[in-house]
Amino acid sequence: MLAQQIVNGLVAGAAYALFALGFTLMFGVLRLVNLTYGFYFSCGAYLALFAVEAGAPLALALPAAALATGAIAAVLDFALLARLRAREAPELASLMVTLGATLFLYSGATALLGSDIRRFPPGVADAAPFALGPVSLTPIQIVILATAGALALGLVLVLRATKTGLAMRAMAENRQAAELMGMDTGAIMRRTSFLCGAAAGVSGVLIGLEYNAITPYMGEAMALKGFAVIILGGLGDVAGALVAGLAIGLAEALTAGYVSSLYKDAVGFLLLVLTLWARPQGLFGRAAVRRA
């Protein structure tokens, strides 16, 4: 059943990549590790669940949850990080602020929503697998594969073919120079945060549907894999995040199928370590140029 193991690995890898795409964009443009990203993932899943329970179809609940999560991300970015950026605080300050905010947000969500697993109502998404040649897939797995590819392509097009994307890239290269050129870097950061939050919301909804298990801390469980994906792919590289996610998913599936499921999680991080030994900047990352 090699073909089935490969498909399982691609689905798992697409899920990892789906989570990491917004994460890597956030780092690439804003140049910080925003630990609240995992909360946006959980937030998107819960918002879609509430919309479905209120009677909205999934086709409406998913984009609504993504837009709402994007808005929450933009507001939190302004509330938590705008003042630090204005004062040119070191990166460690942003890391500690988002760590504290994450603990507060997760604790608040747990107090408000409870820690019990919530599930989408039966029939929201067709979970019946169907045969596709020698392998079987569910409709939601196909959607995850398609969405990961479409989202990666969409983010690349935004960065390469739009004025907003050009401004993001300019700010990522040199924020001070972008400001001197008259760019509103605050607005660019808010737009970036919105896009990243929306991407996290989409991934939360789809992965919540795939496993049909939603908890406040579900984003925390994905964050570790997300770190591995963005480091392996190259910090800030969207295409690299997609390739790295698929590579880790395939490695885990083949290890679980042919060695032991006990080593499934370890092999992904072994792949990360081996890659960084050979290429410290990641698969698609660029080596930093240091000037005296």
Image (spheres, rainbow, N blue to C red):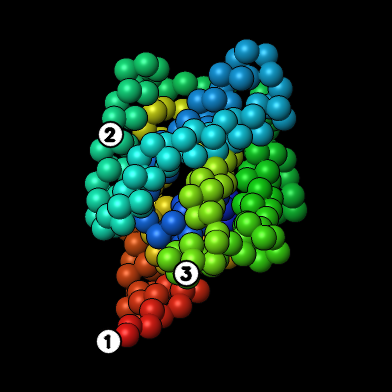
User: Left or right of 117: which side holds 160?
Assistant: right
Which residue position is annotated with label 1? 292
Which residue type does callout 1 highlight? Ala
Q: Alpha-carbon distance for marks 3 and 2?
A: 35 Å
User: Left or right of 234: which side holds 187?
Assistant: right
Q: Is residue 291 above or below residue 148?
A: below
Residue 161 image offset from top left, x and y in percent: 70, 64
Say which of 244 and 132 sits in front. 244
Q: Alpha-carbon distance for marks 2 and 1?
A: 39 Å
Comes first in the chain, label 3 or label 1: 3
Residue at position x 71%, y 27% in the image: 60
Q: Alpha-carbon distance for marks 3 and 1?
A: 19 Å
Q: Secondary structure at mark 2?
A: helix
Dots 2, 1 in contact, CB < 8 A: no
Residue 116 image offset from top left, x and y in percent: 38, 19
Q: Is residue 4 above or below residue 177?
A: above
Q: Is residue 24 visible?
A: no
Residue at position x 40%, y 64% in the image: 231
Q: Secondary structure at mark 1?
A: loop
Which residue position is annotated with label 2? 103
Residues packed near mark 1 inside 10 Å, few (<14), some (14 to 19) or many (20 plus): few
Which residue position is annotated with label 3? 177
Foreground label between 2 and 1: 1
Residues packed near mark 3 inside 10 Å, few (<14), some (14 to 19) or many (20 plus): few
User: Left or right of 146: which side holds 33?
Assistant: left
